Image: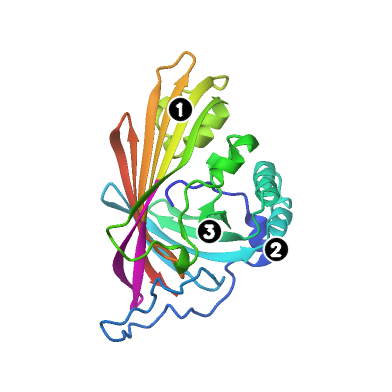
Amino acid sequence: MKKSMTLLATSLFALYGCGSGGGSSSGSTDGNKGPSNQVDYPIVSSVFAPKPETTLSYSFTKDGQTEGVMTMNFTPLSGELIITGLEEETGNEAVVQVINDLINYGITEFYVSEGIMTNVEGTEEDGSIYFAGPDRGLHEITNAYFIGSQYITTVMHSSPLFRLKGADVKENNPIIDISKETVSLQMTLDAEAVANMLSDFEDHQWVENLPSNASCQVTWQQEINETGVRKSFTVSGKSIEAANLTEKNTYYIGCVGMDSAEFGTSSERWFNPSIGLIEQIELMSVEQSTIEESAASLTSIS
């Protein structure tokens, strides 16, 4: 949710009407709350089945300061329809290749989101593409998918945003602590691929100074951690049971003619499969020193 890839997907929304619906979802309660012990969105039996007319609103902060607000929705679309929409505009060839790669490796469930971000600089619209991964988690297609088709089978297992079914969420037992190394890669990448991998750090001086002809030795390690701990949120008058998932990425980069560098990101996510992300806190670090903390919190469902 921080600096995800902005897709040139205007034609998707024009062709398929993503997010054009009206009405409201069952998540909106007009402030009428049920009994205090009632959970309106439990984890058990929950499933991700988004409707285009359901709007999720988030507030964003960066380093403790209000950054802006965003509204978004999800629309289920087949991979073939997404490709058709993207091909209506030039410049989407790389995204089309990624989706074709995913389809070839058995991915069948795709979603698109239309987001409207409002901050002091104005209002900006963009869109993202997601898919249900082999791990039954929702994954966003980000710039990391452009480091090379030969890495697609590794990247498609990385960075699950949340589990799509309550049955796949760890049992409610805080003692459970399951860590999994989802990425462990050592590779040689050119400057463009490194920039895609480090897109969250695009404003950092090291990334800005990366020569266009650079050849770099890269180690990327990612660890996903899940426990059975739960947290309760109230959004639009509804009580939501949320599960926890954390992600840690470490990138060691050594390029010819440059000092080596270590970049890192960590994310803590609270989610309910019926809704998606409820809260996300992200830290960015360089040489193991935090340079930015950002957060997104769900404020309403309508």
Q: Nearer the viewer, mark 2 or mark 3?
A: 3
Q: Earlier in the sequence, mark 2 or mark 3?
A: 2
Reading the image, the residue beneath label 1 is 208
Say which quadrant the C terminus sits in.
bottom left
How far apart, in angstroms, are the residues tagged by discs 3 and 1?
A: 36 Å
Determine the residue positioned at 42% across, 32% down.
251
How far apart, in angstroms, are the residues tagged by discs 2 and 3?
A: 28 Å
Residue 191, numbered label: none
Q: Is residue 182 magenta?
A: no
Residue 16 point in image, percent of width and height: 67, 65
How far apart, in angstroms, are the residues tagged by discs 1 and 2?
A: 37 Å
Residue 136, numbered label: 3
Q: Would you say the magenta stretch is mainly helix, strand or loop?
A: strand
Q: Earlier in the sequence, mark 1 or mark 2?
A: 2
Q: Nearer the viewer, mark 3 or mark 1?
A: 3
Judged from the image, the secondary structure of the residue bearing numbered disc 2 is helix
Find out whether the residues at labels 3 and 1 contact each other: C-beta distance under 8 Å: no
Quadrant of the rendered image containing residue 79: bottom right
Q: Amino acid at mark 3?
A: Arg
Determine the residue positioned at 38% across, 32% down.
263
Reading the image, the residue beneath label 2 is 15
Q: Amino acid at mark 1?
A: Glu
Q: Is 219 left, or right, of 285 in this rendering?
A: right
Residue 90 point in image, percent of width and height: 71, 45
Residue 83 point in image, percent of width and height: 71, 53
Q: Is residue 52 above or below residue 193?
A: below
Residue 277 point in image, percent of width and height: 41, 61
User: Is any part of residue 297 visible from this angle?
Assistant: no
Q: Which residues are magenta?
A: 224-244
